[in-house]
Image (cartoon, rainbow, N blue to C red):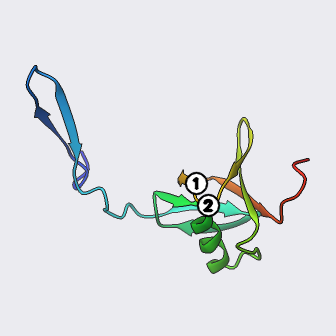
């Protein structure tokens, strides 16, 4: 197991095991994601749609915070609201645009 992310069993009455994950705030490194075909490093495992747009702007992507954010998946495009939390993985591709038609 990786140090800092060890699960420790805690036995409860009735023999049920409960696992507690320690030190969940440890920085894990970085993930390489894309917004509007611009690759940049994201340093967090989870980000809201708004935070992803803020990070993209800081990385030089020419978008506005008012833009809508879509995540490209194997099953199609998923709209990511400003307050929706996304689990970040390397290789994710987002598209930020002014909105309007979903064509």
Above or below residue 6? Residue 45 is below
Seen in the picture, residue 60 relative to 82 is either above or below; the reply is below
Residue at image point 58% right, 54% down: 84
- Looking at the image, residue 1 sits to the left or right of residue 102; the answer is left
Per the model, the C-alpha gap separating discs 1 and 2 is 6 Å
Query: Where in the figure is residue 77, as x and y percent of width and height?
Result: 75, 44
Residue underneath mark 2? 49
Q: Are there few (<14), some (14-19), or many (20+) residues within 10 Å of tag 1?
A: few
Pick the front one: 75 or 34 = 75
Residue 2 lies left or right of residue 35; in this view the side is left
Q: Earlier in the sequence, mark 1 or mark 2?
A: 2
- Residue 59 lies left or right of residue 47; in this view the side is right
Q: Nearer the viewer, residue 19 or 36?
A: 19
Callout 1–callout 2 Cβ contact below 8 Å: yes
Q: Name the image quarter holding residue 27.
A: bottom left
Residue farthest top in this picture: 14
Q: Which residue position is annotated with label 1? A: 84
In this rendering, the answer to whether 76 lies above or below 98 is above
Instruction: Report the residue at 70% width, 73% height from top.
Output: 65
On the image, the x and y values in percent for residue 61 come to 72, 75
Q: Secondary structure at mark 1?
A: loop
- Along the line of sight, which residue is nearer the eye, 62 or 80? 80
Kindly indicate the quadrant of the structure image that contains residue 55: bottom right
SS assignment at label 2? helix
């Amino acid at each position: 197991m990786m140090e800092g992310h060890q699960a420790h069993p805690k036995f409860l009455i009735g023999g049920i095991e409960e696992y507690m994950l320690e030190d969940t705030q440890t920085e894990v490194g970085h993930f390489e994601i894309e917004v509007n075909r611009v690759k940049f490093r994201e340093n967090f495992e989870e980000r809201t749609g708004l935070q992803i747009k803020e990070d993209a702007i800081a990385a030089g992507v020419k978008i506005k915070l008012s833009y809508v954010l879509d995540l490209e998946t194997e099953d199609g495009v998923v709209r990511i609201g400003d307050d929706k939390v996304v689990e970040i993985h390397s290789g994710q591709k987002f598209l930020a645009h002014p909105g309007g038609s979903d064509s």
